[in-house]
Image (cartoon, grey):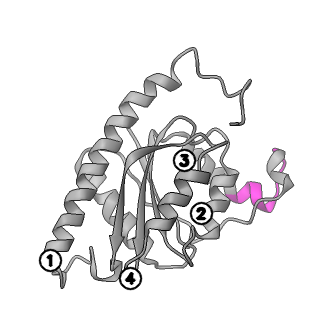
Amino acid sequence: MKISVISGSQRPNSQSLKVATYLAGRLKERNVVAGDPIDLGLAPLPFWDESAFSGASSPLNDAWKPISDELSFCDGFVVVVPEWHGMVPPALKNMLLLCTSELAHKPGLIVGISASSGGTYPVVELRVTGFKNNRICWIPDHVIIRGVKGMLNGTPAMDAEAEEAIKGRCDFSLAMLIEYAKALRQVRESEAFDLKTYAFGM
C-alpha cells in the first residue's frame, strides 16, 4: 500500500511541508509506503490551461505528468493545507483541478494548519468544492493543527500537552485512512467502477 502526502502550500520550506514530512514519517512507521511529500512550494505547477485537454507536450503537461503518475499509483492521500485569508492556497486548488482519475475513489485525509487559531475554513472548502470531478473521497476524520509553528518541531513544545494531543489525533486519523484505503480498493476493482462513461460528477 502506498499513501502520498501532499504539502499544499506554495511557499518554499513551509510549515505545511514540516507537517507533511512528520506525517510521512508516521506512515512509514506503520509499514505504509510514503515517499517524500509532494511539495507544491518546491516546484509550483503552472496554472491550468486548455493544453491539459491534450496529451501533447506543454509546460503544464510536462510538469504535471510525474506528479500525475505518482498519484495514480497511490492508494490514498494526506493533504496538508494551510489557511490563507480563510481559503485554500491557489497551488492546491490548481492541483485538484488538474486531477482526472488519479484520485478517483481513493481516500483523502485533510490536515488543516494555521499559525494562529484558524485552520477550519480550508477543511470546509475542500469538503464542499475539492472532490466533484477528481472523485477523491475525503474521510470523515480530519486534523486541525493550530499554532503550527510551535508544533512538531522535533524539540520540546511550549505546550507539550497540546502537541501530544495532536500527535495522538494524527496517529488515529492515519490509521483510519489506511483502513479506508483497504476498503476502497474493492470499489475500484468492482464492475461498477466506470470513469469512461461518467467522467464528471454532477
What's under tag 4, amino acid-wise?
Ser
Q: Is residue 12 above or below residue 70?
A: below
What's under tag 2, amino acid-wise?
Leu
Q: Which mark is residue 92?
A: 2
Q: Secondary structure at mark 4?
A: loop
| Residue 182 shows in the view | yes
Please report the bounds of the magenta region as a residue range: 54-63
Membership of 56 in magenta stretch? yes
- Quadrant occupied by the N terminus: top left
Residue 167 relative to residue 10: left or right: left
Disc 2 versus disc 1: distance between alpha carbons? 31 Å
The residue under the point 63% across, 61% down is 93
Q: Secondary structure at mark 1?
A: helix
Q: Secondary structure at mark 2?
A: helix
**Residue 95 lies in quadrant:** bottom right
Residue under numbered circle 1: 160
Marked residue nearer the N-terminal end (2 or 1) = 2
Marked residue nearer the N-terminal end (2 or 4) = 2
The residue under the point 41% across, 71% down is 113
Mark 1 Cα-neighbour bin, 10 Å: few <14, some 14–19, many ≥20: few
What's under tag 3, amino acid-wise?
Glu
Contact, mark 3 vs mark 4 (Cβ under 8 Å): no
